[in-house]
Amino acid sequence: MKANRKRPFAGKTVVVTGASAGVGRAAAEAFGREGAKVALIARQAERLEQAKADVLAAGAPAALAITADVSDAPAMEAAADQAENQLGPIDVWVNNAMVSVLSPVKQMRAEEFKRVTEVTYLGVVYGTLAALKRMLPRDEGVIVQVGSALAYRGLPLQAAYSAAKHAIQGFHDSLRAELLHDKSHVRVSMVQLPALNTPQFEWIKSRLPQQPQPVPPIFQPEVAARAILWAAGHDRKEVVVGGSSQLALWLNKLAPALADRYLSKTGYRSQQTDEPKDPARPDNLWRPAPQLYGAHGRFDARAKTASAQLWLTTHRRWLAGLGVLALSGLIAARAKKRLAG
């Protein structure tokens, strides 16, 4: 019992989409280290098997690789059935899969907008529906939506992705209100991520002349994984990761026109390195990139391994308690001084 209290996901069944690389892979490994049984969903079978092996090596008692495209609703239903049949009832479902296109809107094609929407937004909807179908009758379970600061603040050159993340935010708000109305014990949380050092920038479709990069400051995917685990274990509507994400949210709320002008000047340059883009580089918009990528991208030397803002977010009750104690001490000291006087 003592070990289970320290590892709340031990023996639980967790499903992670987009689990073959990047944030999804880091999250799957993190759940595995906590003793969870992990079902990994992605499109690239070889990379998925490699990720499954890493999850088992991390300590998961069982892991299952499911090759599927999240934009296919029946495939998500089948994946959920397979996960429950082989690992047991799903306790946590993490919607993480995404694709994007780096391009000015004027150069985008209609089918590209459709594809990004189908994967990045509708993939979340289909995964959520599959999870709810199984969690609601049991009246328990957690769904974590992997979002972004772009859910609130659109970024130039990423209109399709920003719009999809905005859509997830609206879907999340609606679903959470409905669950509260129904007094359901099924929970949903959304994790808003900053720029991350993942292989996304090796395979994202891009029309920019230089090599794509995440907008600094950059964090390692393990920071995102810690936030996902925390969201799965705590009843919090939203978990914002990184001071840069928090700043983007507040700037957009307080001075959106200023944010537009700032990003018009910095948004193009900040999303590219000084290296010319390899014209033969693959992209994963329509089919998975073939390389055996891991959780990390090429920016290890520039990526932060921790977020002070996330620590403050996940310890705010503890900090509030310290604040109450400090205030009580101050009041007591002043009262003692008055009595002495």
Image (spheres, helix red, strand yellow):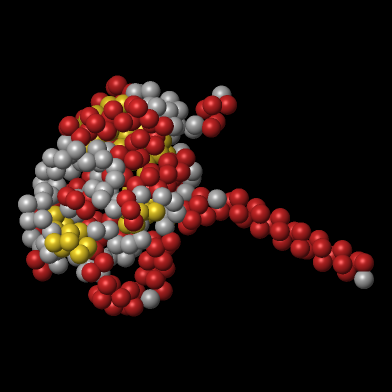
Is 270 left or right of 4, judged from the image as shown? left
Farthest-out residue, right: 340
Q: Position of residue 274 (x, y in %)?
A: 20, 64
* Relative to 107, 185 lies left or right: right
Q: Nearer the viewer, residue 87 or 200?
A: 200
Q: Nearer the viewer, residue 154 or 290?
A: 290
| Residue 123 seen from this side | yes
Q: How many marks?
A: 0
Which of the image's four quarters has the C terminus? bottom right
Q: Which residue is found at the position 48% from the left and 56% from the top?
A: 308
* Quadrant location of the N terminus in the rendered image: top right
In-image side of 268 versus 191 (left or right): left
Does 12 sit above or below residue 185? above
Picture quadrant where residue 149 is located: bottom left
State the residue in front, 233 or 140. 233
At which x and y percent is residue 96?
29, 45
User: Residue sitting at 10 percent across and 55 percent down?
Assistant: 278
Identity of the residue drawn at 33% across and 53% down:
301
Residue 253, compared with residue 230, is above or below; it is below
Image x and y of residue 248, in percent: 37, 66
Q: Is residue 138 visible?
A: no
Q: Nearer the viewer, residue 181 or 72?
A: 72
Residue depicted at 49% across the width and 31% down the height:
7
Q: Position of residue 178 (x, y in %)?
A: 39, 48
